[in-house]
């Protein structure tokens, strides 16, 4: 649970001194938690190591194209949209749920926010609509799961289907071009702050917010509790259902924000937006060390997972490898990450 | 003629896990046809040892000899093929499959190698169940619908479906009623008469007296005594070997009722009932008082507790705290009113096993340490630490992961949770289950002290001496009905057992 280090150099043998934010001032008997906290740190450090290796590979194979400022900005920008979605999904998974509908929610929010009627209201109208549509879809998910007692897999699968359908109905399959200048301007280099695209700043803000929520608030603590042992949480007096509802709302909110970002990025709204985001987001969370059964995971890990994925895609594209190869590589990485996770977990049981 | 070699000899078995030396050179010798009891506190290495025996763990060192031949138990299948079967405490049955399918899981009678001959499996299962004294269990019935006792029988039938020479039973009586325990012992007798050896693990000394032939005592990963006569070794010696102390059940002294008897009740239960679980029950709990519910498994004890707590919705009746009725069926209402529950299944129902002590203790009081949802983690930690220190939870480390704690200290973490919450009524369901003998006395003292400080305690335990030793008043339950209420000092174990079995006082 370390913050992303500013440099990838520091994944050396300093593990002994790294403690998670939850860890105590060093105490002689703290072997247990420090072992666990350390494990999360080691995992995040090793993810950082993987990222460093990828950067090295990119730098070596395509030294000019890869390390170009524009390309690095591109990688970060591409990570931003899926990254925001992944933060929400990570919280849902830590809370013992799953959200398969994120891609469809992004699509629905992006097309609803770019209809001619919405665009009449300008920047605020687009942003507001995207966020509200995301929240509304998340609300439906949350109510169905928390109070309708639907299995999260089923409820969000249903949302995936219907949100995509609704998005298609709204657009009739056409691309909705955005004409609001103030929105489009945010995607242009002129809007960059110290060379950083605004979308990346949003991603960073969402990441920090997600980290704070998970590690510094009662909400985060309750999320871990219901994901780790829902029955124990209920008997401890936690309102498990309300907590679940909030988590899906949060995921919907992230999708709304991501939809707005996608609108900026593409200058349009399409019903095919956010295709397979659910898989990418869940995969990134898992690679980042989030337990699919809930109760454990880190925001930093998920974000690193996203960056690793995007960087691989970028390197492959620069080296003219087609997307089929990329997909295969992604699959292999997921398997490798889960194998490593299993090993770490088994090491933890006595 | 030379004496027959032991069926099993384990010598110098060592096994380490990261940070723990679980077995530190254990010797165990089991003869054919004997009941060999394995005693030891939690963490003494019993579970690890039987997992080594089952082939589930590989020892780091030591030698195993099986019927005179050195062997390596490299996998559960190897152990099974040699004729070693293990019945774990947490039964490893597939709930969705039928009894017969479970019994023959992995070695189903088949035609052409893959078509299961269902009828043959059912006949075979029925024969095994009959041998175990339970012909009434239907082999076609799904295992999930059976009682815990019957599931255990199925587990044993599965063991017997192999050509078994040694059965390891890990606390088989823990979930059983006395008459079911009798049946279990008949089964064990039958097995040993056939020459099968039984390694029997139990916390209950009286059981070991009844069926054991020899005893091996483990402590801190070592066998401190091997092959003692089970029937004649004095209890005091055995306890001393297990604990390194000579303490047995020690109950704290009851304070004089004093003003307690006249204080207004903090908890009142009026006509609370649930169909098929328990009939209308009334009870009052005053501050400083410990009331015990005694009864067999299935007498409705735990159900009453959970209904008072709101975890089950009552069919009728109400629960009042300080005269104010609680919203029925709402745990949150009960917690808000100051009720806390330490449930029977500590690990499944109370603890976040992979989380720290602090997080487990604070989970019910989080909003107290938060402003607008923002946690003051320093305050949280300090308060949790104060609560665990008051209960002398060991280790005194708020960051220790709860999974690594002993049963007694895990229970203290649960109690600390409610102490921190400032609760006034504590519901304890089997508070010493899975807690070793040495730590029990300490837990009893803690519970009594909490009561002395003004907490009202409702206690459920299947160990009658515990209820009698700890409670001030006792309600005796039988089949969901309160059959007797009395001052604990007016009752003795014999009387309570009579009431529990017969439902009316006999003399």
Image (spheres, coloured by chain):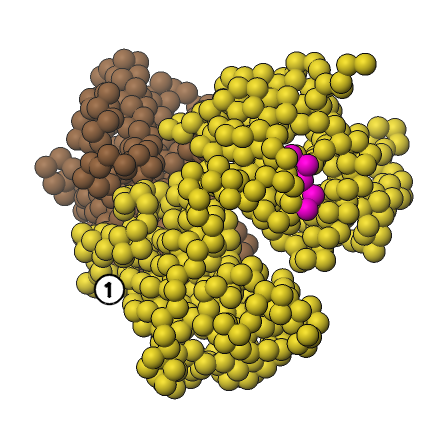
Chain colours: A brown, B yellow
Q: Which residues are magenta?
A: B210-214
User: Which quadrant of the figure contains the N terminus of chain B?
Assistant: top right
Q: Residue at x 19, y 43 (%)?
A: A201
Q: Which residue is mark 1?
A: B368
User: Which quadrant of the figure contains the C terminus of chain B?
Assistant: bottom right
- For this view, does B167 lie left or right of residue A16? right
What secondary structure is found at the residue carrying circle 1? helix
Q: Residue at x 75, y 51 (%)?
A: B183
Q: Nearer the viewer, residue A74 or B183?
A: B183
Q: Tell me where residue A136 appears, x and y as whole percent.
A: 39, 63
Q: Tell me where residue B473 appears, x and y as whole percent.
A: 48, 74
Q: Is residue A101 visible?
A: no
- For this view, does B366 lie left or right of residue B443? left
Q: Nearer the viewer, residue B100 or B222?
A: B222
Q: Tell me where residue A77 appears, x and y as whole percent.
A: 26, 37
Q: Residue at x 58, y 73 (%)?
A: B476
Up-down: is A80 above or below A309?
below
Q: Residue B506 falls in which quadrant of the image?
A: bottom right
Q: Tell me where residue B59 appears, x and y as whole percent.
A: 53, 21
Up-down: is A320 above or below B295?
above
Residue B452 part of the magenta-drawn span: no
Up-down: is B412 above or below B282?
above
- For this view, does A3 lie left or right of residue B82? left
Q: Residue at x 63, y 40 (%)?
A: B232
Up-down: is B281 above or below B205?
below
């Amino acid at each position: 649970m370390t913050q992303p280090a500013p440099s990838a150099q520091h994944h050396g043998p300093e593990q002994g001194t790294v403690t998670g934010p939850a860890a105590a001032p060093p105490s002689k008997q703290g072997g247990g938690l420090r072992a666990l906290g350390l494990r999360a740190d080691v995992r995040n450090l090793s993810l950082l190591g993987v990222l460093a290796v990828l950067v090295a590979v990119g730098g070596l194979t395509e030294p000019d194209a890869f390390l170009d400022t524009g390309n690095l900005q591109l990688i970060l920008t591409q990570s931003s949209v899926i990254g925001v979605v992944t933060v929400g999904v990570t919280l849902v998974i830590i809370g013992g749920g799953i959200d398969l509908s994120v891609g469809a929610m992004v699509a629905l929010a992006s097309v609803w926010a770019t209809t001619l009627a919405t665009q009449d209201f300008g920047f605020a109208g687009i942003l507001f609509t995207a966020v509200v549509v995301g929240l509304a879809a998340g609300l439906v998910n949350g109510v169905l799961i928390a109070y309708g007692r639907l299995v999260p897999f089923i409820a969000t699968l249903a949302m995936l289907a219907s949100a995509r359908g609704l998005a298609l109905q709204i657009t009739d399959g056409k691309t909705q071009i955005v004409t609001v200048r103030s929105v489009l301007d945010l995607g242009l280099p002129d809007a960059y702050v110290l060379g950083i695209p605004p979308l990346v700043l949003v991603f960073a803000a969402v990441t920090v917010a997600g980290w704070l929520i998970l590690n510094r608030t009662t909400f985060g603590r309750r999320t871990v509790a219901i994901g780790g042992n829902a029955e124990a949480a209920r008997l401890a007096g936690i309102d498990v259902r309300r907590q679940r509802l909030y988590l899906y709302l949060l995921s919907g909110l992230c999708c709304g924000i991501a939809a707005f970002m996608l609108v900026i990025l593409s200058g349009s709204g399409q019903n095919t937006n956010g295709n397979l985001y659910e898989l990418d987001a869940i995969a990134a969370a898992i690679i980042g060390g989030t337990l699919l059964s809930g109760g454990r995971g880190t925001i930093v890990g998920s974000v690193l997972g996203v960056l690793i994925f995007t960087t691989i895609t970028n390197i492959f594209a620069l080296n003219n490898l087609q997307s089929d190869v990329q997909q295969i590589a992604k699959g292999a990485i997921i398997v490798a990450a889960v194998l490593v996770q299993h090993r770490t977990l088994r090491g933890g049981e006595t | 003629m030379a004496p027959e070699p032991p069926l099993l000899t384990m010598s110098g078995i060592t096994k380490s896990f990261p940070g723990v030396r679980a077995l530190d050179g254990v010797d165990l010798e089991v003869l054919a046809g004997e009941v060999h009891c394995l005693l030891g506190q939690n963490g003494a290495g019993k579970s690890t040892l039987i997992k080594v025996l089952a082939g589930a763990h590989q020892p780091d060192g030591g030698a195993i000899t099986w019927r005179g031949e050195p062997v390596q138990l490299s996998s559960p299948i190897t152990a099974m093929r040699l004729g070693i079967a293990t019945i774990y405490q947490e039964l490893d049955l597939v709930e969705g499959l039928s009894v017969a399918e479970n019994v023959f899981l992995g070695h189903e009678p088949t035609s052409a190698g893959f078509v299961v001959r269902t009828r043959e499996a059912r006949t075979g299962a029925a024969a095994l169940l009959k041998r175990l004294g339970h012909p009434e269990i239907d082999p076609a019935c799904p295992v999930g619908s059976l009682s815990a006792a019957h599931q255990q029988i199925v587990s044993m039938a599965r063991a017997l479906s192999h050509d078994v020479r040694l059965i390891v039973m890990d606390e088989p009586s823990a979930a059983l009623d006395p008459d079911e325990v009798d049946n279990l012992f008949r089964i064990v007798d039958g097995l040993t008469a056939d020459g099968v050896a039984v390694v029997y693990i139990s916390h209950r000394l009286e059981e070991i007296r009844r069926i054991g032939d020899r005893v091996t005592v483990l402590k801190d990963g070592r066998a401190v005594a091997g092959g003692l006569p089970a029937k004649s070794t004095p209890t005091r010696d055995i306890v001393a070997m297990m604990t390194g102390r000579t303490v047995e059940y020690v109950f704290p002294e009851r304070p004089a009722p004093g003003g307690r008897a006249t204080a207004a009740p903090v908890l009142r239960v009026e006509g609370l009932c649930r169909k098929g679980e328990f009939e209308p029950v009334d009870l009052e709990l005053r501050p400083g008082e410990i009331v015990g519910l005694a009864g067999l498994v299935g007498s409705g004890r735990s159900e009453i507790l959970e209904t008072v707590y709101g975890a089950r919705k009552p069919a009728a009746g109400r629960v009042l705290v300080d005269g104010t009725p609680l919203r029925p069926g709402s745990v949150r209402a009960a917690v808000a009113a100051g009720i806390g529950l330490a449930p029977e299944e500590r690990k499944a129902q109370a603890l976040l096993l992979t989380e720290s002590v602090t997080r487990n203790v604070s989970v019910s009081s989080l909003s107290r340490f938060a402003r607008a949802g923002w946690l003051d983690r320093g305050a949280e930690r300090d308060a949790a630490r104060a609560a665990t220190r008051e209960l002398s939870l060991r280790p005194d480390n708020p960051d220790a992961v709860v999974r690594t704690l002993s049963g007694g200290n895990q229970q203290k973490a649960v109690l600390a949770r409610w102490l921190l919450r400032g609760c006034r009524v504590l519901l304890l369901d089997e508070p010493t289950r899975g807690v070793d003998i040495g730590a029990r006395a300490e837990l009893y003292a803690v519970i009594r002290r909490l009561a002395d400080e003004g907490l009202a305690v409702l206690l459920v335990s299947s160990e009658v001496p515990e209820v009698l030793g700890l409670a001030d008043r006792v309600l005796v339950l039988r089949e969901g009905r309160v059959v007797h209420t009395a001052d604990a000092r007016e009752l003795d174990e014999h009387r309570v057992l009579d009431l529990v079995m017969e439902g009316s006082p006999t003399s």
